[in-house]
Image: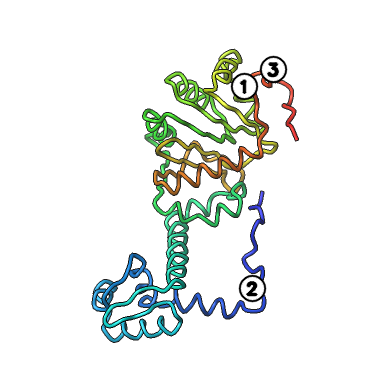
């Protein structure tokens, strides 16, 4: 499964791609110029202050400021300087670009081993949110470490959103335990995991939970290569390896910041919009027969 092609990096740039790349090199290709822009993002500064922050010589700082001023990215008055509107936009773009590259670099082994085919391209464009995430792996002494890590975090949560492309008894047990303590669950299943989930759950309990609005279930029309959880305080994600093996039992990517929580909730909303949402009557007796999905 390949990432959805909802963007084209070179679309509309065929005539001026060289000018665009030159602009990128001008800003990102110089430690001093990029340092000046990034350090002016939070407001006006004295030239001497910028020089000390980026640890460069007075002549190098002055030369960089002159170049940036010529491009109308910076404006100066006396011994102070500030970003222009164009400079602020470039600074925001540069900051996101650097954070995205850092997110790829920090977790390069994770990305190299796993398929990203179930993550739409527009979400990959915001990969910078994973810069402060961390990986939790199983060890020979603690094979359940990824599972127990996020299970402990659920103790203080009131809301859980989950997309399961791989379903084990422990998943249904965790969801059952969560709703028993008053938590609310939104669950997205695939054609494969839907039947497994039903097989591990008492239908009567599911009816009651869905009727009381403690549990909502949606079913995607196709299987996926990603599973993830979002609660009030964390987002965890596991991806299938490139050979098709599910790695959720051995390795997860976990984060807690507002940006990664927003990213996870947006991804869930996207997958939910593609799902057939069930009510308690839709469950019926479908343990052995495929669930008819609505158009």
Question: Residue 294 appears at what percent x and percent y?
Answer: 74, 32
Q: How far is disc 1 from disc 2 in space, using C-alphas?
A: 50 Å
Between marks 1 and 3 in the image, the one whose residue lies nearer the viewer: 3
Question: Residue 205 appears at what percent x and percent y?
Answer: 56, 15
Crowd band around label 1 with a 10 angstrom C-alpha radius: few (<14), some (14–19), many (20+): some
Q: How far is disc 2 from disc 3 in space, using C-alphas?
A: 54 Å
Residue 207, compared with residue 270, is above or below; it is above
Location of mark 1 (residue): 198
Which residue extends farthest front? 77
Q: From the viewer's perspective, tell me whether residue 69 is left or right of residue 18.
A: left
Residue 166, compared with residue 43, is above or below; it is above
For marks 1 and 2, the one nearer the N-term is 2
Location of mark 2 (residue): 13
Comparing 111 with 103, the one in front is 103
For marks 1 and 3, the one nearer the N-term is 1
Q: Residue at x 58, y 50 (%)?
A: 116
Location of mark 3 (residue): 284
Q: From the viewer's perspective, tell me whether residue 198 is left or right of residue 101.
A: right
Between marks 1 and 2 in the image, the one whose residue lies nearer the viewer: 2
Q: Residue at x 46, y 42 (%)?
A: 252
- Say what secondary structure mark 2 lies in: loop
Question: Residue 7 appears at what percent x and percent y?
Answer: 64, 60
Quarter assignment of residue 148: top left
Q: Residue at x 62, y 66 (%)?
A: 9
Question: Residue 141 appears at what percent x and percent y?
Answer: 37, 35
Quarter assignment of residue 284: top right
Q: Residue at x 50, y 47 (%)?
A: 263
- Say what secondary structure mark 3 lies in: loop
Comparing 64 with 168, the one in front is 64
- Say what secondary structure mark 1 lies in: helix
Quarter assignment of residue 136: top left
């Amino acid at each position: 499964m390949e990432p959805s092609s909802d963007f084209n990096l070179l679309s509309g740039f065929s005539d001026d791609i060289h000018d665009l790349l030159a602009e990128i090199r001008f800003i990102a290709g110089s430690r001093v110029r990029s340092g000046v822009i990034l350090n002016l993002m939070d407001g006006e500064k004295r030239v001497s202050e910028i020089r000390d922050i980026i640890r460069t010589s007075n002549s190098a700082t002055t030369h960089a400021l002159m170049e940036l001023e010529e491009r109308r990215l910076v404006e100066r008055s006396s011994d102070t300087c500030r970003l222009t509107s164009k400079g602020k936009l470039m600074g925001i773009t540069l900051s996101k670009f650097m954070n995205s590259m850092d997110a790829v670099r920090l977790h390069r082994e994770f990305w190299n081993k796993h398929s990203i085919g179930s993550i739409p391209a527009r979400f990959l464009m915001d990969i910078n949110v994973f810069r402060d995430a961390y990986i939790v792996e199983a060890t020979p002494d603690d094979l359940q470490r990824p599972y127990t890590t996020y299970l402990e975090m659920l103790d203080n949560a009131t809301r859980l959103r989950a997309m399961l492309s791989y379903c084990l008894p422990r998943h249904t047990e965790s969801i059952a335990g969560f709703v028993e303590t008053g938590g609310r669950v939104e669950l997205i299943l695939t054609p494969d995991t839907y039947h497994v989930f039903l097989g591990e759950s008492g239908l009567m309990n599911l009816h009651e939970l869905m009727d009381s609005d403690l549990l909502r279930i949606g079913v995607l029309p196709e299987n996926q290569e990603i599973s993830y959880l979002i609660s009030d305080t964390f987002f965890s994600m596991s991806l299938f390896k490139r050979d098709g093996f599910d790695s959720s039992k051995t390795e997860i990517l976990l984060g807690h910041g507002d940006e990664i929580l927003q990213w996870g909730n947006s991804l869930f909303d996207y997958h939910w919009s593609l799902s057939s949402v069930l009510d308690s009557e839709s469950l019926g007796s479908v343990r052995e027969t495929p669930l008819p999905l609505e158009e």
